[in-house]
């Protein structure tokens, strides 16, 4: 249940109600809001005198639902905005992993050439083998910071575990929570306390309900800047790395109020179809695309087969732009 309280109530009183009903207390559009489990179906009579509006739900998709908020939330990334009334599709580009200053500078220059604003690059990589490249860690993060200082780009990088969540939060413009980390309560709770956008990726075995509930951890803790990212789920198919769940995207667009970014690179796992998939995603009017690109994919230290050469990335940008325009969106 979501309860919007009348204005002017003493904070002590609100705290007492929250404690009594095991509710989260957040400020939303300058209102005091209490959120309980969706199991609560009837407003307790003691709260009734203090209440402005009540929403009852059949499941714990509450703050993220269109039932609570009809319009898609607006999220600001530096000086660009997605969601809300914007009809922007933000193209985020960059390598899977930050590997060197030369490499990340080259990717930054590629974005600038296309007039793009947001650079991705992993520094703490959640690899499936302990023997693979694990990322440059803090040194890589500092290279991303350098790119922001030098080129004015917004940076998005991933947090792998709670041990470095604070430094990623401190230095990135968007905190990425990866498909493997999305169940990590330490990360979710840390990201709930910040005033920065969080790109939450869907785990490859995660149902839509679980995915949205992970977002609820962040929203109910007080951070309303959550972006959902579909990056492919595991199916019986082995020819492609994962299966991009566009049905799931349609569901999320219909029932949630969160901006949605699609990641065709991790879904397919191969560079050859990333442009075609990006066009399909853009045609759905999504809020963003995140695409891996590397100055020399053959020698990439992670996800080599799916990263686009810079020329391919430029071609993707020019191929997707008219598709976005055809559905009334701007590829930015
Ligand atoms: C990545 O973005 O490089 C990444 C590891 O993605 P995911 O968490 O979706 O596997
Ligand atoms: Mn990757």
Image (cartoon, helix red, strand yellow):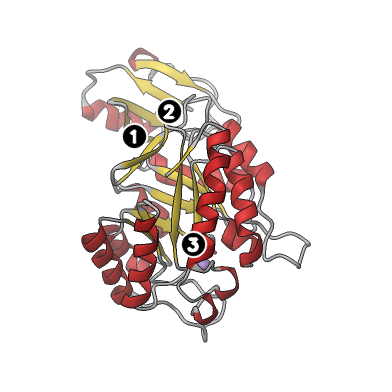
Whether ligand 1 has any atom under 8 Å from the Cβ at mark 3 is answered as: yes
Q: Are marks 3 and 1 in contact (CB under 8 Å)?
A: no
Q: Which mark is residue 181?
A: 3
Picture coordinates of residue 307, whole percent (x, y): 54, 68
Locate residue 285 relative to residue 34 in the image: left or right. right
Q: Is residue 182 visible?
A: no
The tag on residue 25 is: 1
- Image position of 276 with respect to 66: above or below: below
Q: SS of the residue at dot 2?
A: loop
Determine whether the residue tagged by mark 1 lies in a helix, strand or loop.
strand
Q: Secondary structure at mark 3?
A: loop
Q: In front of the other: label 3 or label 1? A: 3
Location of the C terminus by quadrant is: top left
- The span from disc 1 to disc 2 (Cα, nearest Å) is 27 Å
Q: Which residue is mark 2?
A: 85
Image spot of residue 139 (x, y percent) = 29, 76
Q: Position of residue 129 (x, y in %)?
A: 56, 81
Q: What is the spatial separation of the Cα atoms under label 2 and label 3, in whole angstroms?
A: 31 Å
Q: Is residue 118 left or right of residue 273?
A: left
Q: Work out whether 123 lies above or below 23.
A: below
């Amino acid at each position: 249940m979501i309860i919007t309280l009348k204005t002017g109530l003493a904070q002590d009183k609100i705290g007492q109600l929250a404690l009594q009903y095991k509710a989260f207390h957040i400020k939303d559009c300058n209102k005091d809001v209490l959120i309980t489990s969706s199991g609560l179906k009837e407003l307790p009579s003691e709260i009734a005198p203090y209440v402005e509006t009540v929403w009852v739900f059949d499941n714990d998709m509450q703050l993220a639902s269109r039932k609570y908020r009809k319009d898609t939330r607006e999220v600001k990334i530096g000086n660009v905005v997605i969601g809300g009334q914007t009809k922007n599709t933000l193209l985020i580009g960059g390598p899977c992993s930050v590997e060197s200053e030369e490499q990340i500078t080259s990717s930054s220059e590629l974005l600038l050439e296309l007039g793009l604003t947001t650079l991705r690059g992993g520094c703490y990589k959640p690899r499936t083998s302990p023997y693979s490249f694990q990322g440059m860690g803090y040194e890589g993060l500092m290279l991303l910071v350098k790119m922001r200082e030098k080129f004015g780009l917004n940076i998005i990088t991933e947090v792998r575990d709670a041990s470095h969540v604070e430094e990623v939060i401190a230095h990135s413009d968007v905190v990425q929570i990866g498909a493997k980390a999305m169940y990590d309560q330490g990360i979710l709770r840390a990201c709930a306390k910040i005033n920065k956008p969080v790109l939450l990726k869907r785990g490859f075995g995660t149902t839509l309900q679980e995915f949205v509930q992970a977002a609820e951890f962040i929203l109910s803790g007080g951070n309303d800047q959550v972006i959902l990212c579909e990056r492919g789920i595991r199916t019986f198919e082995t020819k492609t790395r994962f299966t991009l769940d566009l049905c799931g995207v349609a569901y999320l667009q219909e029932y949630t109020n969160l901006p949605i970014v699609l990641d065709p690179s991790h879904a397919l796992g191969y560079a050859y179809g990333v442009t075609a998939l990006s066009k399909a995603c853009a045609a759905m009017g999504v809020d963003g695309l995140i695409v891996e690109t590397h100055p020399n994919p053959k020698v990439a230290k992670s996800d080599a087969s799916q990263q686009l050469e810079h020329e391919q990335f430029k071609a993707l940008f020019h191929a997707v732009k008219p598709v976005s325009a055809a559905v009334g969106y701007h590829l930015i």
